[in-house]
C-alpha cells in the first residue's frame, strides 16, 4: 500500500469515527473548503455550512457504523475516489428507536499541499 492510499484510508477512518461519535467538527474537517455532502433525503450541504449540516444530523440520530472499502483508485497526483459500503445501526434520538443502517457510498477526494487528502464530494444511498 502506498503513502497516498494509506492517507486516504486514514481519512476514511477519521470520517467513520466522526459519524460514530457525532462529532460535527471532526466530520467537517474531513472535507475540502469547497466540499459537497449529498445525503439521501436531506438537502445538499456545502463548504462553510458543513459543520452546521452535520450538527443538525447528529441532533436527530446517533450512528454506529463501519465502512468497508470496495474500491480505492488514485486517479492522479491530486484526485482519487472510493466506493464503500457501511453497515451498522442508527438510533433516532427523539424516540430512542434503533434500526439497521446500511449504505453504499461514493467519495471523491482532492489532495492539496497544505491540507493533504480531503473529501471533495460525498454521496450515499441506502443499500438495504
Image: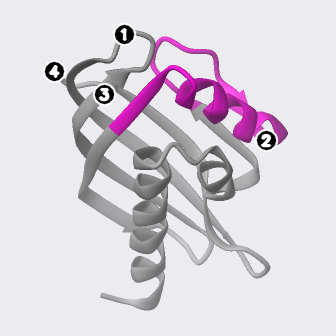
- Please determine whether, in this image, residue 121 is positioned above or below residue 96: below
- Quadrant position of residue 128: top left
* Mark toward the start of the polypeptide (4 vs 3): 3
* Mark toward the start of the polypeptide (3 vs 2): 2
Residue 51 or residue 126, whichever sits in front? 51
Structural distance between the alpha carbons of marks 4 and 1: 22 Å
Q: Is residue 86 left or right of residue 22?
A: left
The answer to whether the residue labelled 1 contacts the one labelled 3, judged by CB atoms less than 8 Å apart, is no
For the point 51% across and 42% down, which residue is it? 22
The answer to whether the residue labelled 2 contacts the one labelled 1, judged by CB atoms less than 8 Å apart, is no
Q: Position of residue 15 (x, y in %)?
A: 48, 55
* Mark toward the start of the polypeptide (2 vs 1): 2
Highlighted magenta segment, given as a residue range: 38-63
| Label 2 element class | helix
Structural distance between the alpha carbons of marks 2 and 1: 31 Å
Structural distance between the alpha carbons of marks 4 and 2: 30 Å
Instruction: Name the residue that disc number 2 marks.
Output: 47
Q: Position of residue 123 (x, y in %)?
A: 47, 34
Instruction: Name the residue that disc number 1 marks.
Output: 95
Quadrant where the image shows the N terminus: bottom left
Q: Nearer the viewer, mark 3 or mark 2?
A: 3
For the point 55% across and 15% down, which residue is it? 42
* Mark toward the start of the polypeptide (1 vs 3): 3
Instruction: Name the residue that disc number 4 marks.
Output: 128
Structural distance between the alpha carbons of marks 3 and 2: 25 Å
Q: Position of residue 118 (x, y in %)?
A: 62, 62
For the point 37% across and 65% down, which residue is it? 73
Q: Nearer the viewer, mark 4 or mark 1?
A: 1
- Quadrant position of residue 51: top right
| Label 1 element class | loop
Instruction: Name the disc covering residue 60, or none.
Output: none
Instruction: Name the residue that disc number 3 marks.
Output: 90
Amino acid at each position: 500500500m502506498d503513502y497516498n492510499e494509506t492517507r486516504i484510508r486514514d481519512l476514511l477512518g477519521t470520517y467513520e469515527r466522526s459519524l460514530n461519535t457525532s462529532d460535527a467538527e471532526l466530520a467537517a474537517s474531513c472535507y475540502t473548503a469547497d466540499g459537497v455532502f449529498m445525503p439521501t433525503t436531506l438537502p445538499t450541504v456545502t463548504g462553510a455550512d458543513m459543520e452546521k449540516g452535520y450538527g443538525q444530523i447528529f441532533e436527530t440520530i446517533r450512528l454506529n457504523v463501519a465502512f468497508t472499502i470496495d474500491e480505492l483508485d488514485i486517479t492522479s497526483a491530486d484526485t482519487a475516489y472510493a466506493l464503500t459500503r457501511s453497515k451498522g445501526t442508527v438510533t433516532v434520538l427523539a424516540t430512542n428507536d434503533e434500526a439497521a443502517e446500511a449504505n453504499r457510498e461514493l467519495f471523491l477526494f482532492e489532495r492539496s499541499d497544505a491540507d493533504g487528502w480531503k473529501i471533495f464530494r460525498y454521496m450515499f444511498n441506502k443499500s438495504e
